[in-house]
Amino acid sequence: MKNALFFLLFLAVFPLLQAQQSGFSAKRLRVHFGFSPLYSGRYTGMGYVYGLGWEKSISRNGRWRIHPYLQWGEEATLFITDVPDAYFRTTELGLSFHYDLIRISLVSLVTSAGIAGLYERGMGGRRRAMYAHLFAIGNASFALRWDNSNKQWAYMFTPIVLSFGSDHLFRILFFRFSVIYKFQKRD
């Protein structure tokens, strides 16, 4: 919880410290935070996820973007009473494509689809056995993006990300908030 509070403070304060600039490249750095229930073939849990990614526009009008990312999280069966106790961590390495379906002024409705590998490891069950498992997953989402072309920062709110994977994996990522830093163009 302490990490989550620090992360939220960073997301709120850091953009305010930067001066307004213009002339940004198509390359961006993206940081996100969200809440995630996870239903895998072995265990069910809830927790938080954090992520870091790189984003690049791949069309002239900037509506298509490619986004490789690394996401990690901690889940537990806290408040879930009908499953064995489990504590586990996930690490996800993925690639997604984003498209601005509707763009009105500063706000866009963004749709995305992607693929990823999810590594889950932890301790669970009645005997508290250690385990590790690798899943192949596909995901889809929609989001609202605020992006002023004259400012160095953009923001994205994703209400839901659905992920389906091998071995009956199903994940719903709720309320993901992203901060996007735009790099300066080099002369």
Image (spheres, rainbow, N blue to C red):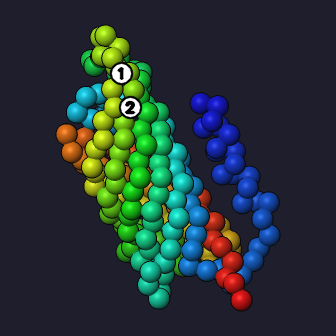
Q: Is residue 144 left or right of residue 115?
A: right
State whether residue 80 is above or below residue 48. Answer: above
Quadrant location, the C terminus: bottom right
* C-beta proximity under 8 Å, tags 1 and 2: yes
Q: Residue at x 79, y 60 (%)?
A: 17
Q: Earlier in the sequence, mark 1 or mark 2?
A: 2
Within 10 Å of the Cα at label 2, are there few (<14), some (14-19), or many (20+) other Cα atoms? some
Residue 171 in picture, x, y percent from top left? 32, 43
Identify the amino acid type marked 1: Met
Q: Residue at x 34, y 54 (%)?
A: 116
Given residues 103 and 19, the one toward you in this image is 19
Residue that badge 2 annotates? 121
Residue that badge 1 annotates? 130
Q: Is residue 102 left or right of residue 127?
A: right
Residue 93 in picture, x, y percent from top left? 41, 52
Q: Is residue 184 left or right of residue 102?
A: right
Q: Residue at x 80, y 70 (%)?
A: 19
